[in-house]
Image (spheres, rainbow, N blue to C red):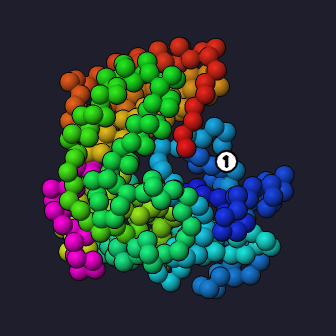
Amino acid sequence: MSAERVSPAPERAADAAPASAAEVIGPDVSAAEETLQGYHHVTHVIPLPGVGADGRRLRGKVREPRDNPLWFDRRCFVSEEQLLADLQGRVDGISELVEAGDMRLQRFIEGSTLGARHRSGQKVPDEVVDQLLELFGQMLAITADTLGTKRGCKPEDRATDPDSSEFLERLIAFAENRVYRQNLADFKSLFDALGVDEDSFKRLRKNVSDLTERPFCLLHADLHRENLILDRTGRLWTIDWELAMFGDPLYDLATHLYLMRYPEPQQNSLAERWSSLAEDIRPGSAKNWEQDLPKLMDFKRAQSVFTDSIRATQILVSGTRFNWALLYREASKVHKALLGAAEPLGLTGVPTIRHVGKALVRWQRERDGRKRKISFS
């Protein structure tokens, strides 16, 4: 049983650049036992000598970055491996680190993704929800002054604890400046056709402003069904910590609920249980959560309009060929994102799926013969 999704690359040391697949397994990737395809990386699963603490044989993972990867989120920590090392004993269900020569690899977690067992929109078993709440509780207890992992963001770029409004503003500014404006030359015609522009961010700020202050803690910031692994014993493991940061604890819950697509009764129950847990662990962590949770989820909905529309172009266009077979699926995704973000972005109307599809085709025709320079960082 081995279905872990692609995870970020292992690193040589705390602040070293990631090791490439060629450096670990050589140019012949046939040495890998499995190869997993991801959006940003291709991950190779390789055998390692010895056994782990659980008595099972060790397998590690190394990655090959894809050409011109698109990044839509800020990175906080310099090294995911160093973060995982520092979290050992403090957070349950995270990857064991294995020394392989002068490199430090993440152990490959044997199991199935939660999404493979319980698809988006389906109820999650209670025993899994219980483990998720334990994870949230452990992260709530970890603060910036109790975790020494080196951060890549400059101190002046970090929101001031516990200013939740400033924290959200930094996220909005990143989406506006580094995702929207920085790539406007390539995607302006698509954005215009979808009805979003610079004024959309003004309206978004107005609709999600004035958050209550809550004490910051460690956030995973990407807890969805493909980043959660269930092993053969039913134990829950959490992978892909590359978006981890410090910030408003309610943001982690909002991101989780948005990405998981729980049935409404289970979503409401989880939010209630989270709020009680948060107040028990760090008083003030769930203050005014009922008023602010919708605002944070609205930000996630708005963010998805830009990420889903740009990703659709990457999925539909490979080289110079357009994948017509996937057009309806991708247009439907973008249409759904627009519907969800209509209120926070202040959209006066949402284009139909047919209109979205035409916009994607028109964008592809415009790009023909044009050298594209896309950058997310």
Answer with left or right where residue 191 lies relative to residue 99: left
Res. 286 image quadrant: bottom left
Locate residue 100, reporting x and y percent: 76, 73
Q: Nearer the viewer, residue 350 or 33?
A: 350
Q: Nearer the viewer, residue 4 or 72?
A: 72
Q: Nearer the viewer, residue 363 or 28?
A: 363
User: What secondary structure is the stretch in magenta mostly built from?
Assistant: helix
Residue at 46%, 81% (x, y): give it.
Answer: 90
Locate residue 143, reporting x and y percent: 40, 73
Answer with left or right where residue 171 lies relative to residue 313: left
- Give amino acid for label 1: Pro
The residue under label 1 is 65
- Look at the numbered disc 1 and give the secondary structure of its residue: strand
- Magenta-drawn segment: 279-297
Residue 295 located within the stretch drawn in magenta: yes
Residue 236 located within the stretch drawn in magenta: no
Quadrant in which the N terminus is drawn? bottom right
Residue at 47%, 48% (x, y): give it.
Answer: 73
